[in-house]
Image (cartoon, helix red, strand yellow):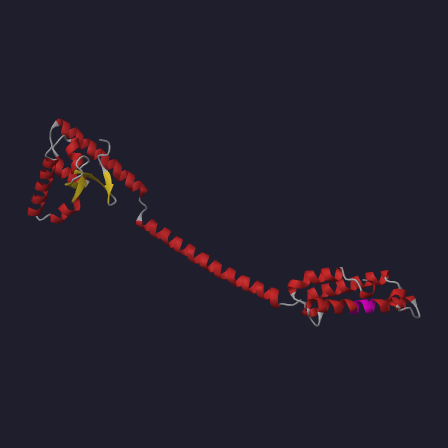
Amino acid sequence: MSNLVFVQHGQPVTDSLTIAEVFDKDHRNVLRDIESQIEKLNEAGEQKWGVLNFEQTHYQHQQNKQWYPKYNMTEDGFTLIAMSYVTPEAMKMKIRFIQEFKRMREKLAANVVPLDERRVRLELFKQAIEHEERLDSVEQKIMEIDHKVETQITLNSREQRILRKAVQKRGMELAEQVTFRQLTMVRDGIGEDIQKIRSQLFREIYRDLWDRFGVSSYADILKKDLDAALGYVSNWIPRQVA
């Protein structure tokens, strides 16, 4: 038998069936030995020790499928029962059990996180969750602010200046391209006519810009629409030559 010791309720144990097989004893005799020791423990006022180290349970027989009693026991319980087994072969088996109990204890100890460390890990996990919740809250507020900026905030003074320069640039570009005959604005002198053309183009660009973005002044254009407004101005064409 390879599994002399197994884990039960988080601690290494063996059972009466294993003891019977390893020590070549009838299981009924092993049960009798265990119950005899439990009775002596009770007489000595050590009932609690007996309860902690011997657990009566049941197993199903592989052949007849009937249920029969057996005992699980700790290393201390095993030691108490095996004391009376003193033949040379029994001594070898006891050493094997002792070694297997030790191996199982070491295996369990390697997998157990100390209580203080578990508490630290739980606290760190709790803090991580709270941190994530705070981040979610901050991100939600940022999204709300961004939405407000996009839907309510208008151009600042720097952005207004950028838009004005774009209008001026487009007006001057068109003034150089448009003939005086097309706009019917030839009068006294070329310089005066060019200035009038520019002024008219500026007014038309602003008027169309306001209509395009539904505002009464370029200063009322939303911050989010600045790029669109600049694109509109750079591609604007006067109605007379459109």
Image coords of residue 102 (percent x, y): 24, 36
Q: Residue farthest to the top?
A: 88
Which quadrant is home to the N terminus?
top left
Q: For the point 32% across and 42% down, which residue is it?
A: 111
Instruction: Report the front residue among 16 and 183.
Output: 183
Residue, x 34% and y 50% (percent of image)?
A: 118
Above or below residue 114? Residue 3 is above
Viewer-proximal residue, 64 or 157?
64
Point out the residue furthest to the front here: 64
Q: Is residue 39 left or right of residue 180?
A: left
Residue 163 located left or right of residue 111: right
Residue at 29% of width from left, 42% of height from top? 109
Q: Is residue 78 magenta?
A: no
Q: Residue 199 in magenta? A: yes
Give the residue furthest to the right. Answer: 188
Q: In the rendering, at what x and y percent does residue 163 appear?
A: 72, 64
For the record, the magenta segment spans 198-203
Left or right: 172, with 227 as reference point: right
